[in-house]
Image: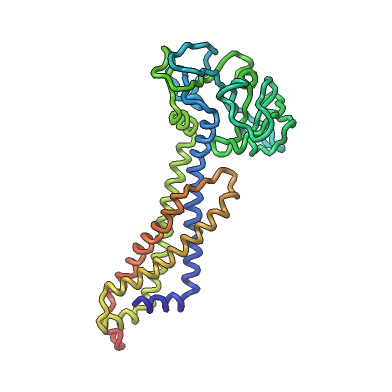
Amino acid sequence: MLTAALRDLQWRKRRFVIAIVGTGLVFAMTLVLTGLANGFRVEAVRTVDSLGLDGYLVKSGTTGPFLGSSAFPAIKLQIPGVQVAVPLVYGSATMQDHGTARSVNVFGSPERGPGMPPLEKGRGPTLPHEAAVSSTMDMPIGATVEIGSRNLQIVGIVDDSTALAGQPNVFLTVAGAQKLLFSDQALISSIGVKPMPERAPSGFTLVNRDGAINDLLRALTGARQAMTLMAGLLWVVAALIVGSMIYMSAIERTRDFAVFKAVGVPTRSILAGLAMQAVIVAVLAAALGGVLSVLLGPLFPMRVDIPQVAFLLLPVVAITIGVLASLAGLRRAVTVDPALAFGGP
């Protein structure tokens, strides 16, 4: 039966190749969607970790130091157990990029100490009109960039620093961020602390690293859920493609199945042949999909970071889809009348 199934694959190779390519494209898009959804979190993790802080103090009633923050006057706090407490500013602004408006994330932190990420080139900003920008902006040190209503001189480059689906991060001094975001008012968004205190002072809420990451991801929750749903639907599409191909093959092999049943071939052997065909198609499609996803990922304007576990799970999912798809042809094979092998009705 297995030899017969392989010969059928060879005989109908054009149809199977089309099914492999179609299913491979579906698998590739599934991996890309998974990479896009994971890329949102990778951006947030990289951004939060680059600040080098263990926790954040925000005003009571707010949910985080970034998107959920609420500005409050800069104050000095004596917090037991905290070695470093730095004022931080966060907000969004727009910049002109070749005639089109582009959103950027603005971070304000002290010139020295935690809150300023490691730099790939140049130095950190020390004056209100200086900025360190993400390398994704593709701007050199010494260039001037207009953000909001201010012209800022680039003095440092931060490697691949983005958040909120590919928006570049811009790092200023606290004074520079206050001029840009708060019209030069002495307001801050949070207080970064290191290490984490046991409790927050009165009027403040303590947010840890995971809470800060989730706060930076809050605006993308709907997009991540939509991508997860689309990835699930694409798995169903892949199963339907393989299943329809196996079912069409079973219809065309009706007389073959009649002969097998007439000579006493057990049903499980027929199922094994169909399952082998479906699994071969699905596994080859998974290999093609993995290659295509790597090639298609850089073409997207947002970060596509496909986790390794997705590549490891893809063959397992492909085999499962192949086995389930073979059931579509099994029903056809089981109901074949052995009399057809002898020219019966």
x and y percentages locating residue 26 in the rendered image: 48, 57
Question: Residue drawn at (67%, 21%), measured in percent from left and top?
Answer: 126
Q: Which residue is located at x 39 percent, y 70 percent?
A: 277
- Residue 163, by quadrant, is top right
In the rendering, at what x and y percent does residue 238 appear?
43, 59
Q: As rendered, which of 109 and 254 lies closer to the eye?
A: 109
Q: How many marks are shown on the rendered structure?
A: 0
Answer with left or right where residue 262 lies relative to residue 306. Answer: left
Tell me, what colour scheme is on the image? rainbow
Tell me if residue 321 comes above or below residue 198 in the rendering.
Answer: below
Question: Where residue 66 sits in the image (x, y, percent)?
Answer: 51, 26
Up-down relation of residue 234 to residue 106 (above or below): below
The answer to whether residue 113 of the structure is visible from this angle is: yes
Residue beneath the point at 69% across and 31% down:
122
Q: Position of residue 170 (x, y in %)?
A: 62, 30
- Depth check: 242 or 339 in front? 242
Image quarter in which the C terminus is found: bottom left
For the question of whether residue 337 can be seen, the reply is: no
| Vertical relation: 169 (above or below) 189 | below
At a point 52% along the width and 11% down the height, the residue shown is 76
Judged from this view, the residue extending furthest toward the bottom is 342
User: Image quadrant of residue 317?
Assistant: bottom left
| Quadrant in which the N terminus is drawn | bottom left
**Rendered position, 332 above or below 198:** below
**Front-lying residue, 268 or 46:** 46
